[in-house]
Amino acid sequence: MASVLGRYGRKWSLGCVSYHKNYLPRFSTVAHSAVPSEPIQQQQAGRSMNLYSAINQALHIALESDSRSYVFGEDVGFGGVFRCTTGLAERFGKHRVFNTPLCEQGIVGFAIGLAAMDNRAVAEIQFADYIFPAFDQIVNEAAKFRYRSGGQFNCGGLTIRAPYGAVGHGGHYHSQSPEAFFCHVPGIKVVIPRSPSQAKGLLLSSIRDQNPVVFFEPKWLYRLSVEEVPEHDYMLPLSEAEVIREGSDITLVGWGAQLSIMEQACIEAEKEGISCELIDLKTLIPWDKETVEASVSKTGRLLVSHEAPITGGFGAEISASIVERCFLRLEAPVSRVCGLDTPFPLVFEPFYMPNKNKILDAIRSTVNY
């Protein structure tokens, strides 16, 4: 497992230096003054670190490079339950890194107001499972702030961080993947990294983006995923998918922690003579349809996998869009390998999860359709 995580994590492209140009009209594409003008390249030697350390380093850089940046949330001042904010309060002061009451609606409401005053507000929701009390603030306030004022006001400096997904023992309330709820909301972006180097670059891009961003972090990878991460300030483009494994027989699309599971299935399929192309979507809204379409046009087959329940999951949106765009080039129905339509279980978590064997079976049946 560790070798797979290291291999897929190291495949991030250093050549993707420009932002995706095909943003939907509801988003602002105005550049921010704090964005480094130099290209993304490995100018300094990287250092081996895990995902939570990469997040911590990105937050250090964000606070250091822009005095208008603030980081706050439940237990953030103490380093957070996953230690992602360790050392920030000591370095930058408790007026910029601080704890909040246990009130997610209040955390996000405060963050919207702070961002509306031309600040960079980085709010942490301790677990994505508890983001729902803040749903109204995100959906009816943050997402519509610019639109309802005709562009006179905006809270584009808002970033909401939240650990999501399975962790092996989280049960009902510490394991959910709620990304699809927010992908239905015009006016916000949804970003999910797969590795430490991706997490650092994508988080800095999210913080500096001119639109509200919900940034989900795969907590299963906080300590498990380790790779070389450049220590300098760099950004990775939003809304630009990455082909991390090339193939010719079937296209697999995923994001976050699920990609390591999908890569294991690709390796097993290769032993049977099946060539799999694996794509990391990275940004779910607005997502890179062109990259996925180009891949499916080549392979003629598509499999989407995510931890969230299959019904209403974002895989359904990808499936529908690709069927519309590639209908005459599809050799088989689109396959989805996802979580079950049940509350996230406790002892039955291994049966719930879309694991390697489930994905491999779907690859076989799709290729042999």
Image (cartoon, rainbow, N blue to C red):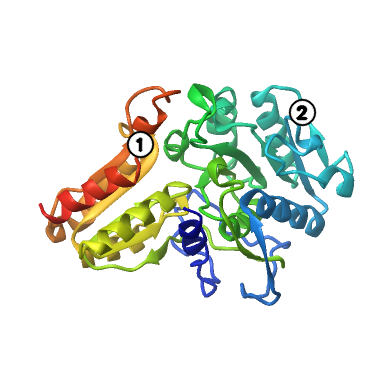
Q: Contact, CB < 8 Å: mark 2 with mark 1?
A: no
Spot occupied by residue 267 in the image (x, y as percentages of width and height): 33, 60
Spot occupied by residue 85 in the image (x, y as percentages of width and height): 75, 43
Nearer to us in this view, 296 or 29: 296
Which SS class for mark 2?
loop
Q: Quadrant of residue 339?
A: top left
- Name the residue carrying label 1: 313
Which SS class for mark 1?
loop
Spot occupied by residue 251 in the image (x, y as percentages of width and height): 28, 59
- Name the residue carrying label 2: 100
Q: Amino acid at mark 1?
A: Gly
Q: Amino acid at mark 2?
A: Thr
Q: Is residue 127 above or below residue 43?
A: above
Q: CA distance from mark 2 to mark 1?
A: 31 Å
- Locate residue 282 relative to residue 226 in the image: left or right: left
* Within-10-Å neighbours for mark 1: few <14, some 14–19, many 20+: many
Q: Quadrant of residue 97?
A: top right
Q: Does label 2 or label 1 sit earlier along the sequence? A: 2
- Locate residue 286 relative to residue 71 in the image: left or right: left
For the point 64% across and 24% down, which residue is it?
105
In this rendering, does residue 187 appear at all? yes
For the point 58% across and 38% down, which residue is it?
163
For the point 79% across and 31% down, which residue is it?
99
Point out which mark residue 300 bears.
none
Q: Quadrant of residue 355?
A: top left
In this rendering, does residue 154 appear at all? no
Q: Is residue 69 above or below residue 43?
A: above
Q: Is residue 29 above or below residue 105?
A: below
Spot occupied by residue 316 in the image (x, y as percentages of width and height): 29, 41
Nearer to us in this view, 358 or 326: 358
